[in-house]
Amino acid sequence: MTGFFERRAAEYLPVESNLRESFRVLAAGRPRGDIIELPGLTIASLGARFQMFNAAFLNSTATQVDFERRLDTAREYFRSRGMAWALWICEDWLDRSVRRRLSQTCQQYGLRLSSEMPGMTAAEIDKPIRRLPDLEYRVVDSAAGMADFRGIGAVCFHVPLDWFSEVFDESVPASRPGFRCWVGYLDGMPVATAASVPSSQALGLYNIATAPGYRGRGFGEAIARHAIGDAVPGRADVPLILQSTSVGLRLYERMGFRAVTRILVYTSAR
């Protein structure tokens, strides 16, 4: 039994740790940003209007008492700054008794379930089962490229553009090389995005999105594979990880990813 839990931890910990690293990269150095590491709790906040990026994370296992103490700390931090916020939880940090009471406990702290995503991993990527479209791939290294990147993301993730622009502003390409962004172009039109974040335990894929009107034609898979191919050399010893939406789940399974945990997001405002 001990071996089972060790194997399971080896699978979900890279997913969880890389997710926290992606938030640290985006929060670092911002005027209203903060990165605070406490026993059992990580706060990685951009100080943004988009509450999903004013984030608190568990960083170790928790009993019910531990969990409530960490929620107290996180709530007080964001309350003192007048910010809406989000709690991102890898459910494997919690034992079954805490999971059963999770939504009820979070409601007591003014948090409601906003989304849940399978955390997925792959040691390597399977070959495509279809011919993928030809795109022009450009790494985001300019204000114009970032505008294309966030324009697609704002639409696909249903976020107001000005909120998304706070998160992915013009400083991202120059000062945050740990968050490498790509845009795929078809005949000069931006149609798909992807990003990669390396960490000591994994290579994370984020912001994989395809513009409406171009979906179902393989653009999302094509740019995801390009981002992986760009980032993997020299990092072949770590797994690939991502958190999937329901829309992308079957695509990632075809590519060789499998779900090893679940990421739950609770937010303080509707």
Image (tube, helix red, strand yellow):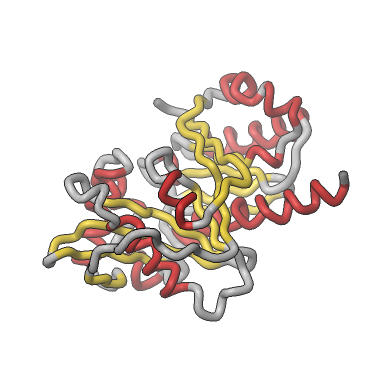
Q: Quadrant of the C terminus?
A: top left
Q: Nearer the viewer, residue 31 or 249?
A: 249
| Residue 20 seen in render | no
Q: Judge whether residue 187 can be spotted in this image.
A: yes
Closest to the observer: 156 or 135? 135
- At a point 41% along the width and 57% down the height, the residue shown is 31
Task: Give above or below for 20 relative to 181.
Answer: above
Frontmost residue, 94 versus 136: 136
Judged left or right of residue 70, residue 255 is left
Q: Position of residue 44 (x, y in %)?
A: 53, 51
Q: Is residue 197 left or right of residue 170?
A: right
Q: Position of residue 192 (x, y in %)?
A: 27, 57
Query: Residue 52's image quarter?
Result: top left
Looking at the rendered structure, the number of numbered marks drawn on it comes to 0
Q: Residue furthest front?
A: 129
Seen in the picture, residue 211 relative to 117 is either above or below; the reply is: below
- 164 to the left or right of 123: left
Whole-percent x, y for residue 1 in the image: 87, 44
Location of residue 104 with respect to 150 vertically, above or below: above
Task: Identify the residue at image location x=44%, y=68%.
Answer: 228
x then y, percent, for residue 71: 64, 33
Residue that sits furthest to the left in the current view: 187
Q: Residue furthest bottom?
A: 234
Camera-side residue: 239 or 68?
239
For the point 46% across and 30% down, which residue is it?
114
- Give the quadrant of residue 128: bottom left
